[in-house]
Image (spheres, rainbow, N blue to C red):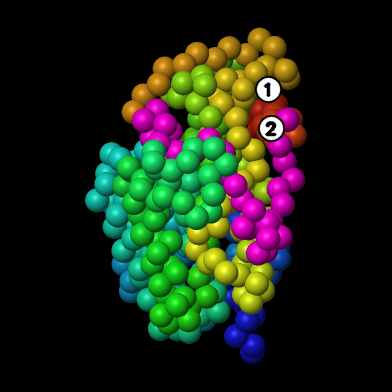
Amino acid sequence: MAKNEMKKILITGAVGQIGSELTTALRKKHGNDNVVACGRKTKPSDKLFNSGPFEYVDITDKDSVEKVVKKYDIDTVYNMAAILSAVGEEKPLVCWNVNINGMYNILEIAHEYDMVRIFVPSSIAAFGPETPRNNTPNETILKPKTMYGVTKVAGELLGDYYFKRFGVDVRGIRYPGIISNETFPGGGTTDYAVEIFYEAIKNKKYTCFLKKDTTLPMMYMPDCIKGTVDLMQADIKKLKHHCDFNMASMSFSAGELAAEIKKHIPEFKVDYKPDFRQAIADSWPESIDDSVARKEWGWKPSYDLSSMTRDMLEVLGKKYKEGKL
Ligand code: SER
C-alpha cells in the first residue's frame, strides 16, 4: 500500500463538537468500518455508536491509544480531543496535560507506527493581545495569555518539529469559533455563538457572556469540516506550512449576530452580562487573513453570516418542532 493512502482512521475527541460531525463526514468518505471514533468518558450518541467502531481512549494514557491503534491497524489520526479556553483557565494543569502531553503521545505513536498522516487542530487562541487584531496574518506575534493558547502555540511547534525531525506528516488549522447544530461545544469562549441560536429558538431570549461589540472570527461547521478534510488531502509538495494555517470565513460581533437572528425572529431579546470569558475574547483577533491556506491548499469558505444564520435556524427550528432540542 502506498504510504500516502489514509486507510484506517482514528478520531480522538469524537464525541465533541467538531469530532462528532467529522466522524460522520469521514465515515461517508472512507467507509464506516475504516473510521474509529474514540471518546474518553462521555457516552456517544446512538448515531456515532451505531455507525461504526467506537472505543474509549484517554490520550494522556499512551497505552490506551496504542491498544486501539494496534487493534485496528490505524494509519491516520485526527486528534480532536482537547480542553478549550474557558475550562483551560479553570483547570490549567488538566489543559496542559490533555492538549500537550496527550498530543505528544499521539505524535510519538504516529512516529513509532510510521503513520501516514496526523491532524492536530490549533486555534485563534494562539494569538494574543500583542498580535495585530485585524486581518491577523499567518506569520505574526504568538504570545497568548491563556493556558489554552499556550498549548496551541506549543502544539503547532511540536507538530512542525515532528515533521522536520522525524518526517511525520502532521497538519493543522487555527480554527476560529465553530458554529454548529449537532453537538454542543463545551468550555470555549466562542460557545455563545452556538448557545444564542438554541435560546433564540427555545426561549426567544438570551443572556450573552460577552459584550455586544465583541467581534471574533467564526465559521460554520460545514466549512470547518470541508477545510479540515481538504487540508488532509492536500499535496504535501504544495505545503510550506504544516500545523499553523489561519482559516477564516466570517467575523461578527455578538450584537451583529443577535441582529441577524432578529431578522428571522423579531421578538428575540438579548442582554449582555460579560463574565471572565470577556478577557479571553479581548485577547483574540477580530478577523483573520487566511491567504496562506487559500494559496497552499485552495481553502475557500462557502458560508457567511446571513447564510449560516438561515441554515442554523432552519435546522434547529425543525429539531425543536420534532421535540429534539
Ligand atoms: N472555540 C475555542 C474556544 O472558544 C477557540 O478555539 O475556546
* Whether residue 25 is situated above or below residue 264 in the rendered picture: below
Res. 152 in view: yes
Comparing 13 with 127, the one in front is 127
Residue 92 or residue 24, whichever sits in front: 92
Say which residue appears at 50% left-offset and 13% top-offset.
271
Q: Which residue is rendered at x = 66% and y = 69% of the image?
A: 234
| Residue labelled 2 has its Cβ within 8 Å of some atom of ligand 1 | no
Q: Check whether the beta carbons of the residues at disc 2 and disc 1 lie within 8 A of each other.
A: yes
Q: Residue at x 72, y 41 (%)?
A: 303
Relative side of 188 to 52, left or right: left
Q: Position of residue 18 (x, y in %)?
A: 55, 50
Task: Name the amino acid type tagged 2.
Answer: Leu
- Tell me the kind of residue under disc 1: Glu
Badge 2 density bin: few <14, some 14–19, many ≥20, Cα 10 Å: some
Point out which mark residue 235 bears: none
Q: Gap in Å between the C-alphas at discs 2 and 1?
A: 8 Å
Label annotation for residue 305: 2
Give the residue at mark 1: 260
Where is residue 201 drawn, in percent x and y?
63, 22
Question: Which span of residues is magenta-colored?
Answer: 277-306
